[in-house]
Image: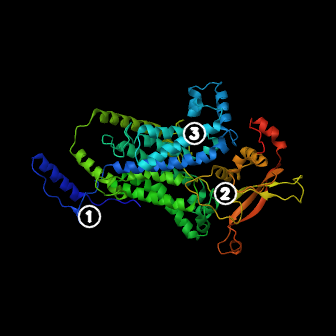
Amino acid sequence: MLAAGPDMAAPSAALRQRRAAAGHGAPAAPERVVAGPAGGGAEPPPLPGTFWLTRIVLLRSIALLYFVAFLVAYHQNKQLIGEKGLLPCKLYLQNVKKYFKGKIDLDALSYAPTIIWFLDWSDMDSTLDYLSLFGLATSAFVLVTGCANMVLMAVLWVLYLSLVNVGQIWYSFGWESQLLETGFLGIFLCPLWTLSRLPRHTPPSSIIIWSFRWLIFRIMLGAGLIKIRGDRCWRELTCMDYHYETQPVPNPIAYFMHRSPWWFHQFETLVNHFIELVVPFFLFLGRRMCILHGLLQILFQVLLILSGNLSFLNWLTIVPSIACFDDASLGFLFSARPGGVKERVVQMQLKDAAREQLPLGCYIRKVVNISFGLLIAYLSIPVVLNLLNSRQVMNTSFNPLRIVNTYGAFGSITKERTEIILQGTSSLDPNDPAAVWEEYDFKCKPGDLKRRPCFITPYHYRLDWLMWFAAFQTYEQNEWIIHLAGKLLAQEEETLSLMATNPFAGRAPPRWIRGEHFKYKFSLPGGKHASEGRWWIRKRIGPYFPPVNLQGLKKFYEDRNWPYPLRD
């Protein structure tokens, strides 16, 4: 856990002595040093108020989240938005182009900002793979080295923006915009060209550091306000009675947390309100309270990570909290070896204190930083107005580049968990009472009653997540689920890679697929069902969509210009 650094009064005094002696041409007075592990002299720790080490941690954290996001994209984009994807992005771009009278002009680019407009569409699967692999390689470089420049960070941002804006419903959630905003701030942490962890003439600007703090302030306050203004269970302190069981993708810890006593769930809800509605204002109460804010927010996000699979959202929310810590409070993360990063930071702080003459480029960069701050302030106006509005909306962008956005999570809580279970049969007649229906299991979402809930965060299965939303809507509102059924009927290998099991593997494909609607509940730990190895109990609600076969779906595919599934 991050902690504040020790009191720096004594080292500051020693440094002042050294500078005074040097100014009179005399040798510096002997300094009091702290004994190191071997009994030798140790370099004083970094002073507070600078953010050289903070930048390294921020860049590596942003790179880690980009890496995870591009990894998810590489593994799943072809199946979701590729040539034969559930919602092909080529068809989406063609429809956008058609809407703007066949032109790729500023209006089309503003509606869907993506470099894919200018790339080859003849093999969209390869194009999507190349973008993801380029993003993986670039983010891995920044993650491993801890250094980046504006060019590299801008490349990462453009690549992910390009995927998000063709991702349609699969990329429609708040963490996508949050990663783009966080990544955009990361661009301005860096020098233009220099690749160095400590670029001497490009110190992290306080404007950029405060932009990160402004981001975490809006994220947390927005999440808190949407809860207070939303579901009454947040005001009645009962939401946590349901959350662990009904969240999109529970994990094994949620199974046990769900059975906590009522008073503990109320305490959790109160703590949530305190963290989201009160703690954000600690940012403006001085260095120590700012550090306390960072510690509390990181601890809160770690608890959320442990209790659910919320994609990389909570990991991503930790990132702007890192900006609450300066070099003095992050020094413990870095080696104290001679010539190491921490020692070099101390030496740079000495040179900064000597007020050396800065090159012209530093003054140009200050102008850029001030302009950036003004841009963030301007783009924040509708966001602040939204926060103050009783009809607050969450996870919304007011600009096509998603630079400054509104955030929020779980404004309403579902009280019952429903699941869609896809079943296939080889029977000629789907209405035959003797027909044997076999179930498909997804990678992570509940299905098989005896399968332990998964633990995958920060990785993310996009199809599993959308199945949770589809379960409390209708299949007419989610036509892609019928597309999925058709691909399972054809046993398309790429689509089957999104599934955990294929009950028809090694034999003829099913003749019919149907969707059944069930209510799911956690079994009682130590109870009858748990003793039989069941994590879940379920009760059938009814059909979700009727049995369909491949031939019967032909017109459905033609009407939507979807490629007709061919059996592999």
| Labelled pair 3, 2 in contact (Cβ < 8 Å) | no
The front one of 157 and 111 is 157
N-terminal label among 3 and 2: 3
Label 3 Cα crowd, 10 Å radius (few <14 / some 14-19 / many 20+):
few
Q: Secondary structure at mark 3?
A: helix
Q: Quadrant of the C terminus?
A: top right
Give how far across and how far down residue 565 sits, in percent: 77, 42
What is the three-letter code of the residue carrying label 1?
Gly
N-terminal label among 3 and 1: 1
Position of 384 with respect to 45 (left or right) is right
Residue tagged by mark 3?
130
Q: Secondary structure at mark 2?
A: loop
Q: How is the image coloured?
A: rainbow
Distance (Cα) linking label 3 and label 2? 29 Å
Residue at 30%, 50% (x, y): give it: 49
Examine the rendered structure and indicate whether residue 169 appears above or below residue 266: above
Give how far across and how far down residue 109 sits, in percent: 57, 30
Residue at 41%, 48% (x, y): give it: 146
Label 2 Cα crowd, 10 Å radius (few <14 / some 14-19 / many 20+):
many
Give how far across and how far down residue 225 sits, in percent: 52, 52
Would you say residue 61 is visible in this rendering? yes
Position of 210 with respect to 66 (left or right) is left
Q: Which mark is in front, 1 or 2? A: 1
The front one of 464 and 7 is 464
Residue tagged by mark 1?
36
Examine the rendered structure and indicate whether residue 558 appears above or below residue 197: above
Rendered image quadrant of residue 86: top right
Examine the rendered structure and indicate whether residue 374 appears above or below residue 390: above
Residue tagged by mark 2?
445
Distance (Cα) linking label 1 and label 2? 52 Å
What is the three-letter code of the residue carrying label 2?
Lys
Examine the rendered structure and indicate whether residue 95 appears above or below residue 500: above
